[in-house]
Image (cartoon, helix red, strand yellow):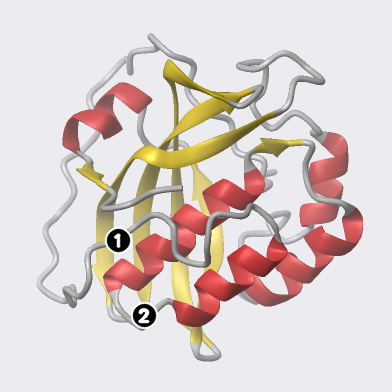
Amino acid sequence: MLVIALRPTPPGQVAATSAPTPTPSTTVIADQDPTGCLGGPSRDAVMLLAAQAAAPHTTNGAVEVAAAMVRWTFRYPGPGRDEANQVADAVIAPTATPGFSDLAAAAAANPNPSQGVVPDGTPFYLSTVPGVWHVESAEPDRVEVSVGSGYVIDGELSPQLRSASTFTLVWQEGAWKLESGSFTRTTQDLYAIGTTFTGGC
């Protein structure tokens, strides 16, 4: 069962086989390049919902929401039940993969979303300052995007620890919402092909 607590790829891990080359899309609407910081520098529900509200109905808008979701999700201490439920109600699509929508249960079951990259109980979060993004596929109302980010542990940005996660977002009810998440790419692969965020936070 897939939950939102996605597991970052440990540094040095190499894919057994090369990832398939994404098929270029001619439906992408290019607008302002993704900053990786839409919604502001905080990592709470206010930031995420602000990013969702500000993100335009474009491919880059979907990239911004995915980056905001990465910043909101991967941190310790993580969100409480009320905050997780607030985000789930607003950001998870009604068509989401089964098991993907219960963010509160996922956070409670997995308080350390780094899955061992960072020791249990150690404060950390992910930053898009050293981040990259890559659109795997895009249609007017559906975008699959991979986001790479860096670990900030005890307030210090790690020079080598990176995370890679892939999200599918759909345009529903006038906003980008998350439908599923996975680990399609390794960090090495994503950082080799990804585009750097123009800002990051």
Residue 41, position as x, y percentages in the image: 54, 55
Any part of residue 97 in sight: yes
Residue 148, position as x, y percentages in the image: 38, 38
Q: Is residue 194 left or right of residue 76?
A: left
Any part of residue 92 in sight: no
What residue sits 75% from the left and 20% below the top? 122
The mark total stands at: 2
Placement of 87 over or under 182, stated as above or below: below
**Which residue was labeled with disc 2?**
141
Nearer the observer, 20 or 55: 55
Nearer the observer, 172 or 158: 158
Kind of residue at badge 2: Asp
**Mark 1 vs 2: CB contact within 8 A:** no
Residue 56, position as x, y percentages in the image: 37, 81
**Which residue was labeled with disc 1?**
34
Kind of residue at badge 1: Pro
Residue extending farthest top: 12
For label 2, the SS is loop
Q: Is residue 139 left or right of residue 86?
A: left
What residue sits 29% from the left and 70% below the top? 59
Residue extending farthest front: 155
Placement of 157 over or under 166, stated as above or below: above
Mark nearest the camera among 1 and 2 is 1
What residue sits 70% from the left and 57% below the top? 44
Label 1 vs 2, first from the N-terminus: 1
Mark 1–mark 2 distance (CA, rounded to whole Å): 18 Å
